[in-house]
Image (cartoon, rainbow, N blue to C red):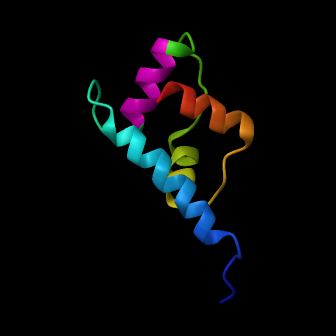
Amino acid sequence: MTKRKDENQNKQVGYVLKKYRMRLTDISPSRRKFIDDRSEKYFDYEDWISEKTLMNYETGKNVPTIQNLKKISNRI
């Protein structure tokens, strides 16, 4: 099987996102709780990211767009 060239960089981005999300002490470490909490606090209950998308970012399967990376990083 051929590996993607940027797979390692994808995982590094995902590791950083997950590391900072897990450091939050005011909510449960689950992705769903993080999304719900941030949706309530910052997005007026608007859906801003799915749990599956966040999981794919954190595991390096997908790379967030600059726009989504800004949304996530500003809320962590």
Residue 74, percent across and down? 56, 26
The residue under the point 43% across, 47% down is 18
Answer above or below: position of 35 versus 17: above
Can see residue 60?
no
Quick one: quadrant of the N terminus? Answer: bottom right
Answer above or below: position of 47 versus 44: below
Residue 62, percent across and down? 64, 57
44 relative to 6 in the view: left or right: left
Magenta-colored span: 32-41
20 part of magenta stretch? no
36 part of magenta stretch? yes
Task: Name the residue nearer the viewer: 27 or 66.
Answer: 66
Can see residue 11?
yes
The residue under the point 41% across, 35% down is 32
Residue 35, percent across and down? 46, 30
Prevailing secondary structure of the magenta residues: helix
Q: Quadrant of residue 61?
A: bottom right
The residue under the point 61% across, 27% down is 48
